[in-house]
Image (spheres, coloured by chain):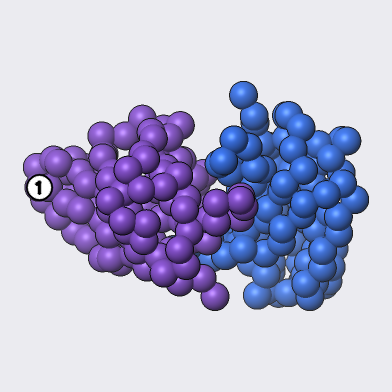
Amino acid sequence: EADIYQTPRYLVIGTGKKITLECSQTMGHDKMYWYQQDPGMELHLIHYSYGVNSTEKGDLSSESTVSRIRTEHFPLTLESARPSHTSQYLCASARGYSYEQYFGPGTRLTVT
Amino acid sequence: ELKVEQNPLFLSMQEGKNYTIYCNYSTTSDRLYWYRQDPGKSLESLFVLLSNGAVKQEGRLMASLDTKARLSTLHITAAVHDLSATYFCAVGNTGKLIFGQGTTLQVKP
């Protein structure tokens, strides 16, 4: 079983608040990813990182930002949450030479 | 641009029946992955297929890969209710996984 963690698991927050979704993995994986997914729908890649100090935007435009200061940690920040940000956010990681991604449990965000 | 398409997107079937989910992709790749997602949960890895002709089986599920046809199949044998979930295929490309739309499987008693 993969060791990748996300906190919080559930978050209800008001419009305009700043939030940070945490993602940590203990497997020493170089690559990390953030996906956004509405219930029962497709996964949309919003950010990814191939190593420390490396971050890229994904295929879906997002108002969020990410950082990768440590290998094991890949937090996602929303400076000003809006109802359109309501979704599930999934974090994943993969070894440097592999495409197989291991997913965290997800954070379900509701912005009121 | 690599595109991954699954068919069907929704499947309702009776317990005990067999069925196949198809995953087509648009450019060459020999790295294909199947994931399962239960409602409200995250993704769980099911199969990793890394070469043409690869076949993997786990219980009532069997996955195969034909890289020449750019096609992977997920075959369900004698479905049971516990298999109800959404199944995603994903193809490896430029360091990322490109996911299909997902196939929601509903197995009725």
Q: Which chain is blue?
A: B
Q: Position of residue B24 (x, y in %)?
A: 75, 38
The colour of chain A is purple
Q: Please say whether residue B8 is visible from this viewpoint.
A: no
Check disc 1 and report its element: helix, strand or loop: loop
* Horizontal relation, residue A60 to residue B28: left or right: left
- Residue at x-position 63% and y-position 37%: B93
- Residue at x-position 55% and y-position 56%: A95
Give the camera-side residue of A85 and A21.
A21
Q: Residue furthest top?
A: B1
Local crowd size for mark 1, using a 10 Å CA cut-off: few (<14), some (14–19), many (≥20): few
Give the camera-side residue of A1 and A87.
A1
Q: Quadrant of the C terminus of chain B?
A: bottom right
Q: Position of residue A33 (x, y in %)?
A: 43, 48
- Residue at x-position 88% and y-position 35%: B68
Q: Position of residue A94 (x, y in %)?
A: 53, 55
Residue at the disc numbered 1: A17
Q: Quadrant of the N terminus of chain B?
A: top right
Q: Please say whether residue B76 is visible from this viewpoint.
A: yes
Tell me the amino acid under the disc marked 1: Lys
- Residue at x-position 64% and y-position 29%: B2
Numbered disc 1: what chain? A
Q: Position of residue A55 (x, y in %)?
A: 36, 39
- The tally of labels here is 1
* Horizontal relation, residue A30 to residue B29: left or right: left
Asked if A52 appears above or below B47 in the picture, the reply is above
